[in-house]
Image: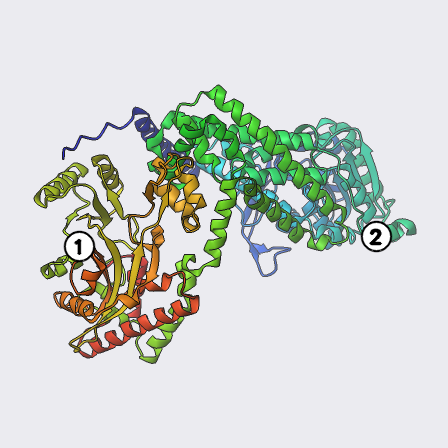
């Protein structure tokens, strides 16, 4: 058997690897430079500085605020104490030093105007533990105390409304009046109208901004950009829920100034503020959210007139408000239908939806539909934004396949998201059915990533890919967005009735829609229906349940037995000849070597992982030649469980691929034809004869061709094979779309492992005294073995029953199972009963060995061993 040298790595892969290294170096340099930047930044001329020492923080019970440096505008830093003081509170992301210069100048003739950069913004300390309203209100109070400001007229812009409302309601003696300019303050009228949903949205924004700022090597440039992670953290920490009650506690004269075309903080917010503060004056001006910056003279005049009246005692307090407005202030908020966003706000939502599709296309479409149901954006923009994100994301997948090729799938980080098996399956789809599979993948969740990536690998023409892809996206996206919108409208029509439960109901709708795409849509295809049937059967039949679920009561039983015998890990002494009794990570080749003198071990050779692949292949060649073996042979890891990575290898190419991805030493073993059995054997120390606790007949699964159906269809049609259909698809990916001839048998499982799809049958009726005696004889060649399972193959069951004619493939220690429990005819109760009996025997044998001087592992050593996944 000749072995060829491996092909050289693709140049494009080298470019990617070197590019990744260069990126990491740049990123490290960027973080190093950023770490050296001062906090706060050096302030420009004209800004004043005050350091707030550590002190109590309003709104944060039991917490102490850290010392911070605040930079601020002060038009009359040495003004006499009789001059009224206006305290300007900025919003987010721009600080006072960037937005209030013209407004401050317009007010400075009559007032001392003070405008601080709030901590987290501008030239003040950037890194603070909390960016929320309560925290900023506390900083403002300490700022006033530090400057000796006994009373101020508060003017808050945009998001500055949050801390200003808190300050006005909670420190009435220090706030003479309150002006809210384009300010927020009503949770029900922001974004989705619910704090928890908005919090999720702001969390997504924070994650995105953090990723941009921390994962792009910008050398500190983005840190000075207004839309940085401090801005995003401010939104994430903000909580408007308490503000409604606080607005109803504002006693001072109040002015509500708002642009009548504001799309970021809609005019309904200003009207609600005016309702909740019955003594307030509402002034709607022509303009949008930036009216303060674009019309500073007009806004300064309105604020000056209001503050002048309040300072001279002519302002209206809550006690003097009209009775009708006072009564109206106590009414609950009526349901509001929002106007669709336009301009920059529409662009913001559209970008957010498009970016969300890169995480989950279906959930992004559902979210867009819910935004449309809320009236925040229209149906057409919701669909357009979803389509844009889908097109960009899937084109990136397609281009990734074209540029970096198939080899990149086996490398980090791409292998975390897509496997070689996924690409092989998608390749089969293309070869069998052509580019039209792109349309089908749009309606089969989970198949898009490998399909589009494979389309690029196979060199599909971009124009052809775009044609099929756009057809599919245009069919699917409006349906999903529209469905979410219709269901969302039904929910929102009853919002006032159950607004306290809206989050839970809305989440249920999202889950319902997501379930629709993953459960209902597959019902419209034969493949989807059969795969759902396979999932149902895996849930119904306990033999397919996850191991932790089945073993939970067994673990409790083992602990109780250990407590009763005053040692939790007696089972680790069941096999003194195996490390830790064969609990985990034992070397299969060492065990087989101990059994080799018995003459019944299938020939094998261990291939050290440290050797180059070419040297390992040469060793395989020598082994096969010395034993006169012809393909196939069996490759398996020297340390492995539940049949993981056990494969029958028939060609040199398959050998090389296996060894290249091997993570530990590999065993190459002769292939033994015939029936496979699992023989669970035990013998108590000091006894002359052992027992066969369990005998399992391991049957391979096969399908028979009809000359019409592909192998994939045959698997789906078979009632047993469909239960493990995804596994069979991966194993037989290279021939999945071939059509077996009529009567041709295709064996789906080569390895007698339940986890790999084999059918296990209880064969206890085949056990004979001769068979038991044979395993007694074999076991005595292994000094220190008392408990475990032999996996054997035999050409004749009759000869096997007579005590001969079998070959041992491997021997497993204390954690091996009596695999007859997986017989489909056995109930969960009987399976658990036999597992508990098995472990009781192991513990009893361990107790016998302990009396003879064998030391079980301590509980601490056992836990370390299991967590490490290997033998110490």
Residue 234: which disc? none
Q: Residues within 10 Å of mark 1 (few under 14, many from 20)?
A: many
Of the numbered discs in the image, which one, if any, rests on residue 331? 2
Residue at image mark 1: 589
The residues bearing labels 1 and 2 have C-alpha atoms spaced at a distance of: 79 Å
Foreground pick, 120 / 423:
423
* Residue at x 69% of width, y 34% of height: 377
Of marks 1 and 2, the one in the foreground: 1
The image quadrant of residue 840 is bottom left
Up the image or down, 310 lies above or below 684; here it is above
Residue 611 locus on image (x, y percent) = 16, 42
Residue 160 visible in the shown view: yes
**Most foreground residue, 9 or 836:** 836
Q: Residues within 10 Å of mark 2 (few under 14, many from 20)?
A: few
Label 1 vs 2, first from the N-terminus? 2
User: Where is residue 207 shown, x and y percent of the image?
Assistant: 52, 41
Left or right, residue 385 beside residue 582: right
Q: Secondary structure at mark 1?
A: helix
Marks 2 and 1: in contact by CB < 8 Å?
no
Is residue 60 found left or right of 608 in the rendered image? right
- Asked whether residue 96 appears in the rendered view, the answer is no
Rendered position, 326 above or below 517: below
> Which SS class for mark 2?
loop
């Amino acid at each position: 058997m000749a072995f060829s040298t491996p092909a050289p790595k693709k140049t494009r892969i080298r470019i990617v690897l070197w590019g990744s290294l260069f990126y990491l170096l740049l990123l490290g340099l960027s973080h190093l430079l950023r770490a050296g930047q001062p906090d706060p930044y050096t302030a420009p001329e004209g800004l004043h500085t005050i350091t707030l020492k550590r002190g109590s923080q309003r709104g944060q019970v039991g917490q102490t605020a850290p010392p911070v440096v605040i930079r601020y505008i002060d038009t009359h830093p040495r003004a006499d104490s009789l001059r009224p003081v206006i305290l300007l509170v900025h919003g987010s992301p721009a600080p006072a030093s960037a937005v209030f210069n013209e407004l401050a100048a317009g007010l400075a003739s009559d007032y001392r105007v003070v405008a601080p950069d709030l901590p987290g913004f501008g030239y003040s300390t950037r890194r603070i533990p909390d960016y929320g309203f309560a925290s900023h209100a506390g900083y403002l109070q300490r700022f006033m105390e530090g400057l000796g400001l006994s009373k101020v007229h508060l003017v808050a812009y945009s998001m500055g409304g949050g801390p200003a409302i808190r300050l006005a309601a909670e420190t009435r003696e220090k706030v003479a009046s309150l002006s809210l300019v384009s300010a927020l303050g009503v949770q029900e009228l922001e974004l989705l109208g619910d704090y928890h949903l908005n919090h999720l949205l702001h969390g997504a924004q924070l994650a995105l901004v953090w990723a941009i700022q921390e994962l792009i090597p910008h050398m500190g440039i983005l840190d000075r950009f207004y839309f940085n992670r401090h801005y995003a953290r401010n939104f994430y920490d903000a909580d408007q829920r308490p503000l409604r009650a606080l607005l109803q506690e504002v006693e001072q004269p109040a002015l509500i100034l708002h642009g009548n075309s504001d799309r970021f903080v809609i005019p309904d917010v200003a009207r609600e503020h005016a309702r909740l503060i019955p003594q307030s004056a509402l002034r709607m001006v022509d303009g949008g959210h930036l009216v303060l910056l674009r019309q500073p003279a007009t806004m300064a005049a309105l604020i000056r007139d209001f503050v002048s009246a309040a300072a001279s005692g002519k302002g209206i307090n809550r006690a003097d408000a009209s009775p009708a407005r006072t009564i109206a202030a106590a009414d609950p908020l009526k349901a509001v239908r929002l106007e669709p966003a336009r301009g920059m706000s529409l662009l913001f939502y559209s970008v957010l939806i498009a970016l969300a599709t890169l995480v989950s296309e279906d959930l992004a479409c559902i979210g867009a539909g819910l935004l449309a149901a809320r009236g925040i954006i229209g149906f057409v923009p919701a669909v357009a934004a979803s389509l844009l994100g889908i097109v960009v994301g899937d084109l990136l997948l397609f281009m990734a396949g074209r540029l970096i090729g198939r080899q990149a799938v086996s490398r980090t980080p791409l292998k975390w998201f897509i496997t070689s098996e996924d690409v092989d399956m998608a390749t089969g789809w293309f070869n069998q059915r052509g580019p039209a599979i792109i349309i089908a993948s749009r309606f089969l969740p989970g198949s898009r990533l490998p399909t589009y990536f494979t389309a690029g690998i196979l060199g599909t023409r971009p124009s052809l890919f775009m044609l099929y892809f756009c057809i599919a996206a245009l069919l699917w996206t409006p349906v999903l967005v529209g469905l979410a919108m219709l269901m969302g409208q039904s929910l929102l029509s009853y919002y006032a009735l159950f607004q306290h439960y809206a989050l839970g109901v809305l989440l249920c709708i999202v889950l319902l829609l997501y379930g629709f795409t993953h459960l209902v849509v597959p019902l419209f295809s034969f493949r989807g229906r059969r795969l759902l049937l396979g999932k149902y059967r895996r849930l119904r039949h306990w033999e397919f349940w996850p191991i932790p679920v089945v073993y939970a009561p067994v673990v409790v039983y083992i602990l109780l037995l250990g407590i009763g015998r005053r040692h939790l890990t007696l089972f680790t002494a069941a096999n003194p000849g195996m490390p830790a009794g064969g609990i985990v990570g034992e070397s299969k080749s060492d065990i087989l070597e101990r059994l080799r003198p018995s003459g019944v071990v299938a020939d094998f050779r261990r291939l050290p992982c440290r050797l180059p692949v070419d040297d390992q292949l040469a060793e395989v060649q020598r082994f096969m030649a010395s034993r006169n073996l012809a393909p196939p042979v069996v490759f398996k890891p020297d340390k492995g469980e539940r049949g993981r990575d056990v494969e029958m290898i028939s060609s040199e190419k398959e050998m090389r691929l296996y060894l290249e991805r091997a993570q530990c030493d590999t065993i190459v073993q002769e292939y033994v034809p015939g029936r496979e059995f699992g023989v669970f054997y035990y013998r108590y120390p000091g006894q002359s004869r052992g027992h066969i606790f369990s005998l399992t007949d391991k049957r391979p699964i096969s399908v028979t061709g009809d000359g019409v159906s592909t192998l994939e269809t045959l698997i789906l049609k078979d009632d047993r094979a469909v239960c493990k259909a995804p596994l069979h698809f991966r194993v037989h990916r290279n021939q999945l779309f071939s059509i077996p001839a009529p009567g041709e048998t295709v064996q789906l499982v080569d390895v007698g492992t339940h986890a790999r799809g084999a059918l296990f049958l209880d064969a206890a009726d085949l056990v004979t005294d001769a068979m038991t005696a044979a395993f007694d004889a074999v076991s005595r060649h292994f000094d220190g073995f008392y408990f475990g399972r032999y996996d054997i193959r035999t050409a004749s069951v009759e000869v096997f029953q007579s005590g001969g004619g079998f070959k041992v493939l491997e021997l497993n220690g204390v954690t091996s199972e009596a695999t007859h429990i997986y017989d489909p005819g056995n109930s969960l109760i009987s399976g658990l009963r036999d597992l508990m009996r098995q472990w009781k025997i192991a513990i009893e044998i361990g107790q016998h060995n302990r009396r003879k001087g064998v030391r079980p592992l301590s509980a601490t050593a056992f836990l370390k061993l299991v967590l490490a996944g290997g033998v110490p």
